[in-house]
Amino acid sequence: MLRINNLNMPLNASTVDLKKTVAEKLACRIADIQDFKISKKSIDARNKNNVHFVYSVDCKETVPLPSDKDVEQITPPEKLVYHIKDDGVRPIVVGSGPAGMFAGLALAEAGLKPIVLERGSEVDTRRQEVDVFWKLGKLNPESNVQFGEGGAGTFSDGKLTTGIKKDKFTAKVMEELYSAGAPQEILYLAKPHIGTDNLRVVVKNIRKKIIELGGEYRFNTKLEDLVIKDERIVGVKISNNGEITELLATRVFLAIGHSARDTFEMLHRRGVYMEQKPFAVGARIEHKQLDINKAQYGKFADSPYLGAADYKMAVHFDNGRSAYTFCMCPGGQVVAAASEIGRVVTNGMSEFARNKENANAALLVGVGSKDFGSEHPLAGMYFQRKLEERAFDLGGKNYAAPTQLVGDFIRNAESKKVKSVHPSYTPNVAWSNLAALFPKEIADALRKGIVEMGRKLRGFDNPDAVLTGVESRSSSPVRIVRDETFQSNIKGLFPCGEGAGYAGGITSSAADALKVIHSLCTE
């Protein structure tokens, strides 16, 4: 196969136009181009007077390779095939987020009939439970934005961008998501996303495939304890509707997500090696999406070919701190993402169309042991809890989120009312001063970050923009230590995904699970 890179095309270019450009590059006829496929599509908006698309395409090699630096010979990634020894005991997968789904799928494809345990509900019931929380402030601590089928990613923008190397594992993730109902464009867009609306369909279809292959899902079923003998896993204790039972287990795949705090505490009690992991905290920042479009695309802001603009920024300070944006949700909303009673957490979410009034992103500052005040493996988790408790108190103790205008936050003055940007968080917001929420050093870094980012993206420091806190679940606060065989110090226990501290996001979490399962292959 040939891959042709760096094809600059106008926004309104058609597939025929793209094929003509490829034919010119290869010095061949359009009819000679076979198996034509777009492999990458990105936006180049560096010059606001010439915003355009940049493509890479693949096609079958029917002509001699021209002497052009942008044309290369490629080998498609190998297909994953799993051959794993069956020891007669069904493997257990704990969690049904991206890592859990893909661990379950790989095990099912190997013929091992896994049992997938999920403490929350299946996705349709979960959606109803989340809606009750968002509308009425009634939280189900076992099934919410963090827990339930699909994991935390189900209520997000469904971003599939990742910093890890694209290989056979990430290719498998994309192919399976597409087969399960994700839009075809995820296979080639530089910044693909599924959208929370499509994700709900995708996770159901992956579940259906696992079950068809002999696997089993058990919803509203929580991992309560590990049964360990001679530093090896021999079983798990699980609860469902208050009834505790025990399952025989020789291989347990921990895909518990970054918010399973009671499970982290159980693992620590059981002697599973864990360590602190740095993460980041801050708030959600909201602007009008039209303003972001104008800042990014200039006179092309209204183009029907571009969609809602996004951004990604970072600034670094002399004191070693840094501030950055994360999980930007174009045309989305800020959502209540608590999973524990008496705590407020925010996150961002977009549907596939990304057509809501506001853009939002996490505005974060990195934190570590110095901020936690302890070397305890779970100190970062307890630090998160303190921030979330302060946010709950500051919001009025009814799951309203503390909210402040950017201009007031920079001036360190309490906000009183909304201006041009309306906060999207539900069930409610409480106008506050977020300086009362964060330690001073973190609040100062957030202020400086906003000002510096305003120099990079016009209007980012708009005084009417809205900050809503607290964003505390950017990534796992712990790493569950594993060895070169992907096992913890308890043999047969395989930590994987974001909750275990080895990934960050849908694609990397799913790919990490596939790597773990692949390590078991006998050929």
Image (cartoon, helix red, strand yellow):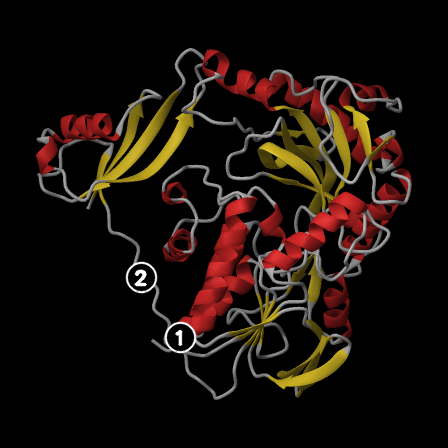
**Which amino acid does the dot numbered 2 rest on?**
Lys
Q: Looking at the picture, tell me which residue is in the foreground, 90 or 313.
A: 90
CA gap between label 1 and label 2 equals 14 Å
Q: Who's the residue at 40% across and 24% down the image?
A: 305
Task: State the residue at coordinates (75%, 55%).
Answer: 339
Residue 228, image x, y percentages: 68, 84
Task: Pick the residue in front: 264 or 131.
Answer: 131
Whether label 1 touches label 2, CB < 8 Å: no
The structure residue drawn at horizontal position 79% and vertical position 54%, both measured from the top left corner, is 139
Q: What residue appears at the point 31 percent right and 61 percent down from the top-left corner?
A: 79
58 left or right of 45 in image: left
Q: Secondary structure at mark 2?
A: loop
How packed mark 2 is, by other alpha carbons closer than 10 Å (few <14, some 14-19, many 20 or more), is: few
Numbered badge on residue 410: none
**Residue 53 in picture, x, y percent from top left:** 36, 25
Residue 198 appears in view: yes
Residue 366, percent from left and from top: 70, 41
Amino acid type at mark 1 = Ala
Which type of secondary structure does the marked residue at label 1 adopt?
A: loop
Residue beneath disc 1: 110
* 70 left or right of 147 in image: left
Q: Number of labelled discs?
A: 2
Q: Is residue 88 above or below residue 28?
A: below
Instruction: Note whether residue 277 is visible.
Output: no
Q: Up-down: is 93 above or below 284?
A: below
User: Residue 330 lies in what quarter of the image?
Assistant: top right
Place of residue 277 in the rendered image (x, y in percent of width and height, measured from the top left): 68, 54
Which image quarter: residue 286?
top right
* Residue that numbered label 2 is attached to: 79
* Side of 255 relative to 298 (left or right): right
